[in-house]
Each structure stands twice: as structure tokens, then as C-alpha cells.
Amino acid sequence: MANIALQMALISKSDSLLEKKVLRGQNLAGSLRELRTACRRLAELMEPAAGATNRTVLELLKETQLMTLDPRIVGYLEEREAAEVIDDDADDMGREITAMDAFLSCPAAQFWGYREYVDEQSPFATQQKIKGAEFERVQIVLDDDEGTHPQFSYDRYFGVRPLSDQDETNRQEGRETSVDRTRRLFYVSCTRAFQDLAVVYFSTDVAMAEAKVRESGIFPTASIHLVNELPA
């Protein structure tokens, strides 16, 4: 059923094989045959057992003109060497190339899960601006290293790391620190759950993090576990 739905969606949205050929007076039956063949090939690649990567699928889309690809994607499909790319910020471009290489190597079948998420058919969801909202089950991930907002720090909030010089200055002058901001965010996040709450805390000093979390008294001692203590 998923493959049939995929083919129908592509046929209805194709902006290449139909518009570029049919609307210019070319053979309708021939164009539809091309479209059907391309859709079948794509559906086969999207089967989990096929083991196709995102690169394989995008190359098929480019080859068959099932849809018009962003020129930036086409550039990566043509496997440009990093040395051939000229950019004012080499570090940013290097990160972009690394990210795109990883994306193109991902299994294409993972998009089925993404589609369920976008269509709100998944049991999981990420939430933004949730103040006042409530959810039956909530999982919170605390990870300073992977976070993109330096104004928050869970290691500093729990006392695993000392305050920064700027935080110390702000504290002495009565201004807001990263600990104050993090405390408010953590409170809002934790109080969204009305049945089950799970907090996953990543830290470079696990022993210290465990000790500080226990000292804080925020959670019952029996509810605090290291990852190796959890069932497989």
C-alpha cells in the first residue's frame, strides 16, 4: 500500500515528465509509460530490503526527471571535490560537505519513518513553545556538547562545571546567569508531563553528574540510573 501511495503521489505532483513533455505536445501514452516505470523503480528502491541510500534515490530522480531537484543537491550528486568548492568560510563549507556526505549515505527507507512523523502518525513528537501545554509522556534530553544554545548549561546548573567568568560577574552584579536561564527551561520542560517523565542527561563526567543530580534532590534516589544499569 505504501508503494501504491508513493506512486500516486509522484504522478500527481510530477513537474518534469508531464509538464515538460506532455504540455509541449509530445506523446501522452509514452510519457505516462516513462512515468510509471520511473515510479516503480523508485518504489522498489524505497523498500527497506532494497538497502538503497539517499544518493541512489536522488540519482534516480535526477535521471528520470520525476521531480526537479534543488541545484545544490545536484551539485553534491555530481560528486564535486571539496577542493573545487570556493567559499569565504572554509570551515562552514567543510561542515556542510561532511553533513551532506552523511545524508547521502543514509538508508532511503528511513524516510518512511519521517513521513509518519510529518503526518503526525508517529507516537513521538518534538515540541517547541510548550509553556502551559501538557503531555502524557515526556522525555527530555540534556546535552551541553550537542546543544546549540550556549546561554544554557546543564553541567553548570547541576554543578558539574563551575560558572563561567561572565556568569560569575553577572551573579555578583545581580544579573541573570546561564544557571538561572537553565533552571527556568528545565522547570518548564519537566512540568509538561502529567504521567511519565524521563530525563536523559549526557555528561563528560558521569560520576560527578550522578553525584550532583542526587545531591540536588530534584528526583527520588531510586529513580536515578546510569545507562549500564538499565535493562537491555
Image (cartoon, rainbow, N blue to C red):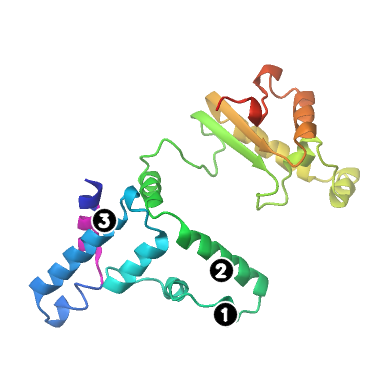
User: Mark 1 — residue?
Assistant: 85
How far apart marks 2 and 3 lie (CA) works out to: 28 Å
Camera-side residue: 99 or 69? 99
Query: How busy is the neighbourhood of tag 2: few (under 14 within 10 Å), some, or many (20 plus)?
Result: some
Residue 165 appears at what percent x and percent y?
88, 51
Residue 69 appears at what percent x and percent y?
37, 71
User: Mark 2 — residue?
Assistant: 97
Residue 202 appears at what percent x and percent y?
68, 39
Query: How busy is the neighbourhood of tag 1: few (under 14 within 10 Å), some, or many (20 plus)?
Result: few
Quarter of the image with the C terminus is: top right
Q: Which residues are magenta?
A: 6-15
Residue 180 appears at what percent x and percent y?
76, 40
Residue 43 is tagged as 3
**Residue at 39% of width from left, 45% of height from top?**
113
**Residue at 37% of width from left, 64% of height from top?**
56
Q: In the drawing, does residue 178 fall left or right of residue 36?
A: right
Q: Amino acid at mark 1?
A: Val
